[in-house]
Image (cartoon, rainbow, N blue to C red):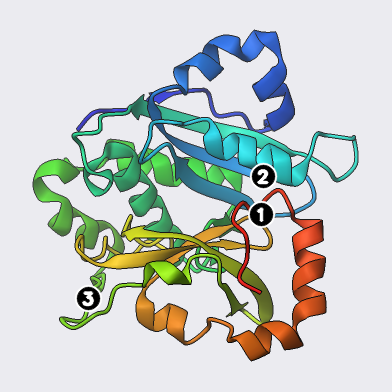
Amino acid sequence: MKTPKYFKWRKRGIEIDDFLNDDKYAKQREMLKNARVFYVIRPNSEKVFKIGISGMHDGNGIGRLREYQLYYGNNDGKCSGAKIHFLGRTNYDPDVAQKNSEIYKRELFVKRYLKKINVLDRGRERTSASIDAIEGIMEQYDNGPDFKTDKRRSMRTTLGKINTYRPEPTAKDVPKDYVGRFIMKDFNGKVHLGMIESVGPASGDDDGSDAKNDNQIFANVLYDDGDREQLDFKQINQRVLSELEVKFRMPQLIGLLDENRKWWQKKPKF
């Protein structure tokens, strides 16, 4: 297993805008080029941490951090901005599939553990776990058995039995003409608007389930709060808005488009 190079855990965090623009972090920014990255950040306006990965398909490890800066803005001493608490990286190798990369396996382990102890919120990036707890889970991964040779047994030993994702034999691909369409999805009683940015092969579930069928085509959904998720055809078809629903919700959609214009890169199908 290739161990990633870490930046130090920072309990107080570094403001994202400082990290991206201050000359004293130029060396660290350079290290995120041609890299796959695991990150832990915390928005200044929220009481949760966000954990995730970046640069998995193209080596643009700094890309997701720039998206967070656009969404949360620069620190104004009040609620704007977000802080970086941890970064870990490995060199990007296009010959190594995402699901076989060390960064992906690390994220999978951490999110499975957080889900097991019921502190993985909304099923994607957010967790109410403390920074000390997240660091402790990372240490368990680092000090654990060699997952490369005995991943299945070691995961069961650490976390108990885990149900693996088994795609339906007749599972449908998400059609390309779904790109640009909107969905509505309920997360623990709060409904969020999402737009299908693109379709493509699976990259594994953000909530910690196993990687899906490599041959199946999924929808890459961007939500109104900047979070992302992959959904299969069945999940999308249950939630995609029809033309009539779009017309009915037009004021809401326009409001979200104006408020979060930086997130919507593709022309929506109104």
Residue occupying the point 42% across, 36% down: 55
**What residue lies at 15% left-to-right and 81% top-to-bottom?**
169
Q: In which quarter of the image is residue 256?
A: bottom right
Q: Is residue 124 above or below residue 94?
A: below
Q: Residues within 10 Å of mark 3 (few under 14, many from 20)?
A: few
For this view, does 246 lie left or right of residue 166? Answer: right
Query: Do the residues bearing badges 2 and 1 touch, measured as CB atoms within 8 Å?
Result: yes
Between disc 2 and disc 3, the foreground one is 3
The location of residue 54, given as percent across then percent down, is: 46, 40
Instruction: Residue at 89% x, 35% y: name it.
Output: 76
Q: Is residue 212 left or right of residue 244?
A: left
Observer-nearest of 46 and 269: 269
Query: Percent x, y for residue 219?
Result: 42, 66
Q: Nearer the viewer, residue 76 or 47?
A: 76
Q: Along the horizontal axis of the image, is 20 left or right of 152? A: right
The C terminus appears in which quarter of the rendering? bottom right
Q: Residue under label 3, please give it.
A: 167
Give the answer, above or below, for where 168 lies relative to 35: below
Which amino acid does the dot numbered 1 rest on? Val
Coordinates of residue 224 in the picture (x, y in percent):
68, 63
Disc number placed over residue 48 in the picture, else none: 1
Mark before the other along the chain sequence, 2 or 1? 2
Residue holding disc 2? 42
Residue depicted at x 26% and y 60%: 211
- The amino acid type found where label 2 is placed reads Arg
Q: Mark 3: which amino acid?
A: Pro
